[in-house]
Image (spheres, helix red, strand yellow):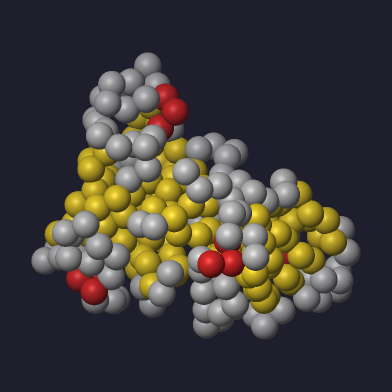
Amino acid sequence: SYILTQPPSVSVSPGQAASITCSGDKLGDRYACWYQQKPGQSPVLVIYQDTKRPSGIPERFSGSNSGNTATLTISGTQAMDEADYYCQAWDSTTVVFGGGTKLTVL
Amino acid sequence: QVQLVESGGGVVQPGGSLRLSCAASRFTFSNYAMHWVRQAPGKGLEWVSSIRYDGNNKYYPESVQGRFTISRDNSKNTLYLQMNSLRPEDTAMYYCAKETGFGLFDWGQGTLVTVSS
C-alpha cells in the first residue's frame, strides 16, 4: 500500500515562513492535497491539485509537488495557523493520508 | 454553502453493527463522489470508503473491507455507511466528505462511534 510520510511537528515564529513536507514514492506523479484541522473542528482543505487554493483560503498558503515530496508553505505565519496539517494523495482509486504534522507558532 | 450532516453514531458492543447517515444539501448531490473518513481519538485521519456519483463503484481500504458497506440514495441526497462486525479499533469520529477535483472540499461535523463492552 502507498505510504505518505510527514514530520510529526514543525515550529515557526510568527511572521516567518513555515514549510511542511510530505514524502511518498513518486508523489510528484500524483496530485497532492493539504488539510488543516484545528482542535475540535473538522478538516479544511487548504491546497488541492498540488498548488491550487480553494476560495476563502488566504494567499499565504501555497503548495508544490515534485519528485517524491509535496510541500505546504505558509508565508507570514499567524497564530491562527497553529493546527494539524495532513497531506493526502490518491493511490489508484483509494485515498491515502499522511500521518499529520502539528504546526506550532511560537 | 454546502451542508453535510452526519448522524447515527453511538456506543455499540464489539461485534455489533451501526449505520451512519450523511444528509447533503445546497449542492447537486448526484453529481459528486462522496467519502467517509474517520479519526480515532488523538490520532490522524484515515480514509474509510468512497462511492462514485452514481453509486456504481465503491472502494474500501483493507482495514474495513468486508465489514463496511458504503451506499447512497441520490433521491434522498443521503450517503450511508453500514458498519458490521465492529471492533474496538473502529472507535472514531466519522466524517463524510464531498470530493471535487481530486480534493475533499467539504466535510461534515462528524458523528462519534464508540465500540466498547
Who is closer to the viewer here, A83 or A35?
A: A35
Q: Quadrant of residue A68?
A: bottom right
Is A48 displayed left or right of A69 in the figure?
left
- With respect to residue B27, does B7 lie above or below? above
- With respect to residue B69, does B100 lie above or below? below
Quarter of the image that includes the C terminus of chain B:
top left
Question: Which residue sits at x=86%, y=73%?
Answer: A15
- With respect to residue A43, does A73 lie above or below? below
Could you say where residue B113 lies in the image, as x and y percent from the top left? 38, 36
Question: Which residue sits at x=50%, y=60%?
Answer: A89
Could you say where residue A26 lies in the image, as x and y percent from the top left? 58, 60
Question: Which residue sits at x=44%, y=55%?
Answer: A91
Quarter of the image that includes the N terminus of chain B:
bottom left
Could you say where residue A46 lies in the image, as x and y percent from the top left? 58, 70
Who is closer to the viewer here, A42 or B100?
A: B100
Who is closer to the viewer here, B48 or A90?
A: A90
Question: Which residue sits at x=53%, y=52%?
Answer: A97
Who is closer to the viewer here, A48 or B36?
A: A48
Could you say where residue B56 lies in the image, as x and y percent from the top left? 16, 59
Is B19 displayed left or right of A50 in the figure?
left
